[in-house]
Image (tube, rainbow, N blue to C red):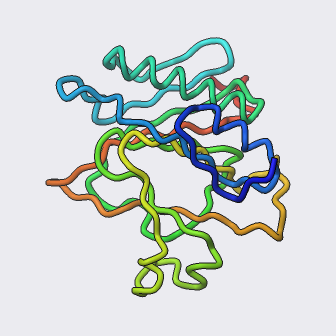
Amino acid sequence: MAVGAVVQGQAPTVFTTLFEPQVRMAIWSRPSPMPPDAPPPADFTAECDGRWIAPSGPAPEWFLQDIERLAEIVAAISGCETWRARCETVTRRACPRFHQDAVPVRLIVAYEGPGPEWAFAGEIGEDLDGRNISTRRRVRTLHPGDVAVMKGTAPGWEAWPEFPEVLHRSPPAGRRSPRRVLTIDAAPGREDRV
């Protein structure tokens, strides 16, 4: 299959492209599943040891179902049945610099507010803060509900050097414009600690 470093699709099958070594990020474009009357908890975590899911507290049914469905995607891509999920209400720009995560695989979805911003490393050069106008013109932003799965820098993926690196960062947020963001990380080696 001839695909680039970033692949976007309308169904979760888009994530199968991550098995291609050159693909660094896949995006499932979907509307946010968050109903207006049942937002996720302001702060919520869950861990799975491969058999049991341990949530930090109660949460709406739609949210728990979405976490389970998305965690299955992370497990299928990473080959690791253990994972960590964290949902936060973000009121500031948590990661202002473009970067890659030091995990094997990270899934990110914003239920409310903009999703992560991303760019190809070669397009922004040394401007990891994204301050130059030329950089800002090259930055793309994921929509609420879009699910992005990114390969991280942890061992497990052999990158093709001739394909571009994909970097991401948090978009702006504030008290009047909060973001509700879920991340799920593959957590290899955590089977004995959960």
Question: Where 7 falls versus 17 (above or below)?
Answer: below
Judging depth in this view, the residue of 86 and 30 nearest the camera is: 30
Residue 121, x across and y down, in percent: 63, 74
Judging depth in this view, the residue of 190 and 30 nearest the camera is: 30
Residue 30, x across and y down, in percent: 43, 36
| Horizontal side, residue 9 vs residue 180: left or right | right
| Horizontal side, residue 1 vs residue 73: left or right | right
Residue 96, x across and y down, in percent: 42, 68
Judging depth in this view, the residue of 76 and 87 nearest the camera is: 76
- Residue located 74% across and 52% down the image: 154
Judging depth in this view, the residue of 162 and 65 nearest the camera is: 162
Residue 179, x across and y down, in percent: 29, 48
Instruction: Find residue 172 and report its image quarter.
Output: bottom left
| Horizontal side, residue 111 vs residue 189: left or right | left
Residue extending furthest toward the left: 176
- Residue located 34% across and 38% down the image: 111
Instruction: Find residue 185 and report its image quarter.
Output: top right
Question: Where 82 falls versus 187 (above or below)?
Answer: above
- Residue located 83% across and 69% down the image: 161
- Residue located 55% across and 37% down the image: 184
Q: In which quarter of the image is the C terminus?
A: top right
Tally the numbered discs: 0
